[in-house]
Image (cartoon, rainbow, N blue to C red):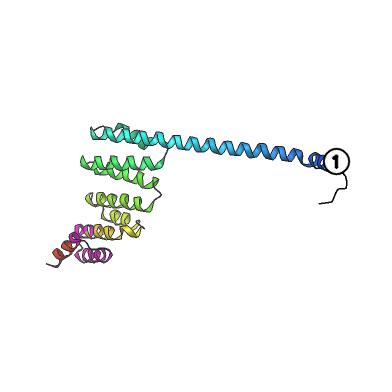
């Protein structure tokens, strides 16, 4: 920056800089404040929306205890918060299984699977769906569901269910291999018993 010898020159330089850059500074400040307030408004809206979805889900669950499923169905059909929609669909599926409506339960779980992003929750949905499909006699579809589970924490359970499905199909060798893979992933007395029963 040049060294100014008099105050008048300094004042004149500041005035010139403001003439050249003042409009850009004001516009930048206005835009910056607009973005800041817009972001804060958006964050407040998202938080409020999540709280409303949470309350709606909790109320729907309390109705489920009384045998009412309409509120949960409304959560599933809502356009907001796929996480709560997935949880509601899973609860509906559970109720439908209890009522023996396996095909409808499968449909609810497929919807839930499309909405979840978390691998662990996907594992829960896929294993439930595999069991339902196996009950319906759709063994290949059930195995495909199991193959979609990627979370390592589900490996033992997936292989146990795969063994159960292979046994239902009548393939004892495949069932034995699946149970052994399950036990290799995690020790489980139930799986051990299943494997021992196959050896007899």
Residue 78 visible in rendering: no
Looking at the image, which residue is at 65% across and 38% down?
31
Percent of width and height locating residue 102: 24, 44
Which of these two is toward me, 67 or 15?
15
Based on the picture, tell me whether residue 162 belongs to the magenta stretch: no
Looking at the image, which residue is at 75% across and 38% down?
23
Which of these two is toward me, 186 or 142?
186
Looking at the image, which residue is at 34% across and 60% down?
152
Disc 1: CA contacts within 10 A as few (<14), some (14-19) or many (>=20): few
Image quarter of residue 165: bottom left
**Residue wearing tag 1:** 12
Q: Which residues are magenta?
A: 164-191
Dominant SS type (magenta): helix
Looking at the image, which residue is at 81% across and 39% down?
19
Image quarter of the C terminus: bottom left
In this rendering, the answer to whether 140 lies above or below 90 is below
């Amino acid at each position: 920056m040049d060294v100014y010898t008099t105050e008048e020159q300094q004042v004149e330089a500041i005035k010139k800089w403001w003439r050249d850059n003042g409009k850009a500074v004001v516009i930048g400040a206005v835009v910056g404040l607009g973005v800041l307030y817009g972001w804060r408004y958006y964050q407040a809206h998202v938080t409020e929306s999540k709280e409303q979805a949470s309350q709606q889900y909790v109320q729907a669950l309390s109705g489920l205890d009384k045998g009412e499923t309409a509120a949960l169905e409304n959560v599933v059909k809502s356009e907001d918060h796929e996480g709560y929609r997935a949880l509601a669909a899973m609860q509906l599926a559970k109720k439908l299984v209890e009522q023996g409506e396996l095909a409808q339960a499968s449909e609810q779980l497929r919807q839930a699977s499309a909405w979840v992003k978390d691998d662990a929750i996907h594992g829960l949905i896929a294993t439930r769906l595999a069991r339902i499909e196996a009950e319906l006699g759709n063994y290949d579809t059930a195995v495909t569901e199991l193959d979609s589970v990627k979370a390592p924490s589900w490996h033992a359970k997936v292989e146990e269910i795969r063994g159960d499905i292979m046994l239902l199909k009548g393939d004892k060798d495949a069932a034995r291999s699946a149970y052994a893979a399950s036990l290799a992933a995690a020790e489980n007395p139930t799986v051990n018993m299943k494997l021992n029963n196959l050896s007899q």
